[in-house]
Amino acid sequence: MRNHDAAQALSPGESFSRLLNHDPLRRGEGEEFPPAGPARSLRSILIVDDKAELLNSLHQLVNLHGYQADKALGGADALEALGNKHYDVVLLDLIMPGVSGHDILDYASQKSLDTKIIVVSGDSSFSGVKHALRCGAFDFVKKPYEAGELIATMETALRQCKLENENQHMEEKLKESEELHRFIVNNSPDLVYMLDRNGCFIFLNERVESLLGYRKDELVGRHYSELVDDEHLEQARNIFNERRMGNRAATNVEVRLRSRLNRRGPRLFHAQSVWMELTAEGIYSDSNERTREKFVGTYGTARDISERKEAQEVINFQAYHDLLTHLPNRALLKDRLSLAIAHARRNKRKLAVMFLDLDRFKLVNDTLGHTMGDRLLKAVANRLQSCLRRGDTLARFGGDEFTLLLPEVRTKDDVVVIASKILDRLNAPFVIDGHELFVGASIGISIYPEAGDTEESLIQNADIAMYQVKGRGKNGYQFFSEEMNHSFSTRLTLERELRNGLAQGELRVFYQPQVSLSTGTITGVEALVRWQHPVRGLLEPAHFLPVAEETGLISQIDDFVQQQAFSDVAYWRGKGLGSVQVSVNLSAVQLEQEGFVDRFVSSMQNSNLEAGAVKLEITENTLMQDMEVIVPKLKELRRLGVHIAIDDFGTGYSSLSYLQQFPIQTLKIDRSFVGDIRADETDVSIINAIVAMARGLKLDLIAEGVENRTQLRYLNAQGCSEGQGFFFSKPVPAGEVARMIRNQPFEALVREELLLDTV
Ligand code: C2E
Ligand code: MG
Ligand code: MG
């Protein structure tokens, strides 16, 4: 300690330290100073005097009081000693020849020695003392000294030295510990913060930079709300104003904080804010007195939980969405529908549910594979979405079924507009991987409240209406009406009735003649199933085959139709009605069944019908389903002499290379292409292509759906040898077709038409 002003009050013989109000620690008998620091001995005392006897007597005095000391005779000696060793205290004579006491003081201050120098000098002039103190002397003892005073002063210096050493040691310790804490705080995985009582940041650890992209100093002094995502201000207010402490304080509050970092990740998640889990507790200047006045601010931590949140969001998303198209799934649709119903009920409004089933999706999936099917579904989902308005929900129900919720409709016409738009958009071909794919849709619509007032009834009734569209020949829409429910309500009822009908013999086989287009002679008949329904009358296949296919009943139906057709044809042949061939349709289910070939053959044999009289009609789609199973069976039948034709040719996706693997003789041109032949229209390129292809592959051709003379003439001119269609006859019961075979009414008709043509 250096106190210059105090020197002014110094009177001779007085110890300077006493003036400084020091409480010198006096050593009792046998007491010693504890060591002050690790590297130093407290006994490092140096006595400097140029007079040997004075030097020795001082040394003795010091020794007498139990202290070791070194001696330096004169200033030069002293400099050397100070250069070699650290001394805590130096007793220094001022006036010495050569190197004086002042020089020693200068040296000590130059070298910043922390040695306490007590000047012991006969020069007690004010200026001498002042100068000595200014130069850094610790105290001044006037010669001739009083032993007690000198020792007391020396001990004061030693005591001070010890205190300073301890202080320094403590400071070092503190510094270390502070560094340690700073390290711990800054390397914490969590953000650590402190707010003042107004909610402004007074401290943030360095994590804030890597977590949120802000520098600490940017945020210090700013209000916490600037860091909180708008949607979370309410929760944030509660946590950042926390005044409670300990267990009662807030923990695990989840809020989103603004971030400057651009995080990668799915778009579903907010890129510019981060989910954090916060804790907070109040800080008080006096922890025993948690009053408003003593409240200082809030301390807390924030942990980045974005990964967990994202995982949760993914899980939630998966629970409520279809993963392929990312559309809402059945569960989410039902949820939204129930809200929409409640809303509509309250506001006396209408809403509509559309059930949409793709018409030719299965075909794509079966022929081109699931990957293509998936891509098509995604493309369809996109197109559908482009038809929607805000607030509408499009959901995928699985497979190729979509459901659409229109929560705001005023009239049926609103819905008609959307349904037509959807059909329109879906009718345009999808081009995927170079394939041009055509899918239509069958849409059933139910309107709240007429068609139901619960989620289940609305969805189910839209489904029923959709089946009506499918039954009518697909690609269209239909509103649900009560009669549908009453007469032919659900597929379940239909299935039950069909089973029953099969057992009760309600199925019939009708025949449609197949006619040579050049002579008009009936060359064959196609067997087509009908259902004589006890209530609904005669039903065409479209009304019940979809359900039969779904339930597998189709193979029983096929068995029945084949047996009936074989026995009818055998009967006609037996009656001398010529050698017409009979065509029967095969379903995929039947074809894939084990033992199919044997059953088919024995069915022919039971009727005594030769294989050459039978033609199989198989659609392209059926052929493509399970080629490994189907091809050997067809080859076996072909070997036996059965004819094989591809039905509805041109609507599937079969390629030439596939066709060549099948043992087929006939292509049956789909009636949609025949329908394109009109008097005014010349674009019949598909027909021409099929004709050319058949010729190339040496296959017979038969056109289905021939409805007028234009078509007859055109097809004949192209070289299509046979035709079938309403122009000749609708499918009719066995008796009627037998009459036609006997009378051959189309020979004259065709002759006439072709003659007219050549005229
Ligand atoms: P398909 O095998 O292509 O049969 C021809 C369909 O075209 C028949 O419909 C027939 O009535 C209709 N048709 C014939 N000429 C014309 C025409 O000039 N204009 C129009 N617009 N249509 C014409 P149908 O009898 O309703 O049969 C529909 C489909 O049901 C059949 O198409 C066939 O795929 C399937 N089917 C019919 N009977 C059976 C069967 O016993 N077993 C199997 N597996 N499928 C059958
Ligand atoms: Mg057919
Ligand atoms: Mg056909």
Image: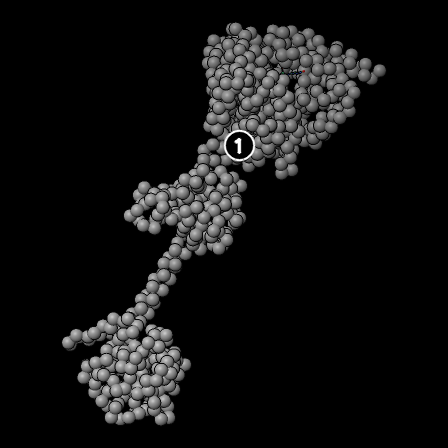
Q: Secondary structure at mark 1?
A: loop
The reply to whether residue 84 is in sight is no
Residue at 70% over, 13% down? 727
Q: Nearer the viewer, residue 257 or 98?
A: 98
* Residue 636 in the image: above or below residue 413: below
| Residue lying at the far left of the rendered structure | 29
Which residue in the structure is indicated by mark 1? 327
Image quadrant in which the C terminus is located: top right
In percent of width and height, residue 755 lies at 80, 14
Query: Measuring 36% from the left and 89% from the top, which residue is drawn there?
Result: 100
Taking the image as shown, residue 256 lies to the left or right of residue 434, namely left
Would you identify the image quadrant in which residue 351 lies?
top right
Out of 104 and 233, give the one closest to the viewer. 104
Q: Nearer the viewer, residue 717 or 273?
A: 273
The answer to whether residue 679 is seen in the rendering is yes
Residue 258 on image: x %, y %:
50, 45
Q: Which x, y percent locates residue 690? A: 70, 28
| Labels in figure, total | 1
Answer with the quarter of the image where residue 531 lies: top right
Q: Is residue 520 left or right of residue 566?
A: right
Determine crowd level at label 1: few under 14, some 14-19, many 20+ residues with C-alpha closer than 10 A: many
Toward the viewer: 587 or 744? 587
Q: How is the image coloured?
A: one colour
Residue 315 vertical placement versus 579 (above, below) = below
Q: Relative to residue 384, is residue 127 drawn left or right? A: left
**For the point 47% across and 18% down, which residue is it?**
454
The residue that appears at 44% across and 41% down in the rendered structure is 236
Quarter of the image that includes the N terminus: bottom left
Image coordinates of residue 168 in percent, x first then y, are 33, 69
Residue type highlighted by circle 1: Leu
